[in-house]
Image: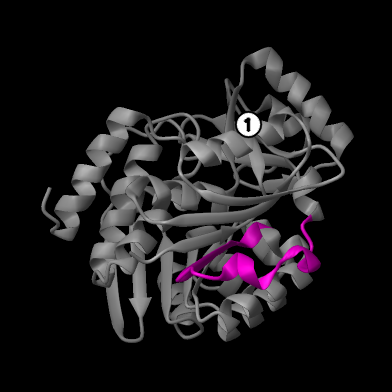
Amino acid sequence: MKSILGIGNALTDILAILPDDTLLKKYNLPLGSMQHVDARTGNTIWADLKKIGIQYVAGGSAANTVSATAILGMPSGYIGKVGDDELGSLFRQSQMQNGIKSTLLVGTVSSGRAMVFITAPNADRTFATYLGAALQLEPDDLKPEYFEGYDYLHVEGYLVQNQYLVRRIVEMGKAHGMIISLDMASYNVVESNNVFLQDIVKNYVDIVFANETEAAAFTHKPPREALQAMSEMASIAVVKVGKDGSMIQSGDEYHFVDPWPGDAVDATGAGDTYAAGFLYAHAHGMPLRTCGEVGSALAAKVVEVVGTKIDIPRWKAAKQEVRRIMGVEE
């Protein structure tokens, strides 16, 4: 079976469901954005969220994706950096439980964390992220042997705070003949790194994922036209349009995939899980429409829970649905 390696910011998600947008305004966090904060601000926000009630879940975009591929049965690896602390141990333990072959390096500061504000009425999520040790992952940390034996390389766009690192990652992926996929991350990350991302997508990326706001920031076009523009840069382009579904294009081949039904309570991790389903199906040689349907089916499960971790009953149902979509016998 084909395998996948993910590289990203090793973060623990600290999730809080907010009664209103008071805290977003207090910390000047635009709805739906991802903002970096320093350690002091991060600790202050963390303290405020504790008053509301929080959950701790090992997260990080690429880590979420390979966690899902691993649970589906695809050999999966991950590279990241954590601190020598409780959150780092939580992250490491979560990866082990999911069967991921982890290369978790240890930094000199505390582990990164993403404070996730979940707000009504659409379960929108806004991130205040303290990267901590994750930010200490450097190009020189990467060794060729980390990439050996993998067929796919999945990179999260959040890593572009270190452009040298991202370039090194994709160069090593190409050198190992891997199929490279990139998830764009947040629209404000795309806006501030657009020229760099354009170069990376055109020259290294085979499969690019974006939601409609990220696609707009990347191409300055509405979703359908953005998809077309992205498909001219990468072999396969995917634009997710939230509850309306997703669009896929490769050359002249185009598909619109309807969303799978689900009772959304929290959209955190939906895009990461969609990418997992898409890449899992792609690794099995499925047609593009089928890849999108598998991604959509998995995303519909994760939005029904708070956080990025699908529970066991939903995973059981998801695996059955995936087998049905792909036409695989029980």
Rendered residue at 59%/86% (across/down):
203
Q: What residue occupies the far top of the structure in this picture?
A: 51
Query: Looking at the picture, how far across and down is residue 173, in whole percent?
Result: 58, 75
The residue depicted at 28 percent of the width and 48 percent of the height is 297
Disc 1 target residue: 90
Secondary structure beneath label 1: helix
Above-or-below relation of 25 to 77: above
Return the residue nearer the eye: 202 or 121: 202
Tally of marks: 1
**Residue numbers of the magenta segment:** 137-158
Q: Is residue 241 something one can see in this rendering?
A: no
Q: Is residue 148 magenta?
A: yes
What is the x, y in percent for residue 285?
A: 27, 72
Looking at the rendered structure, the kind of residue marked 1 is: Leu
Q: Where is residue 221 in the image (x, y as percent from the top left)?
A: 52, 73
Q: Is residue 213 above or below residue 269?
A: below
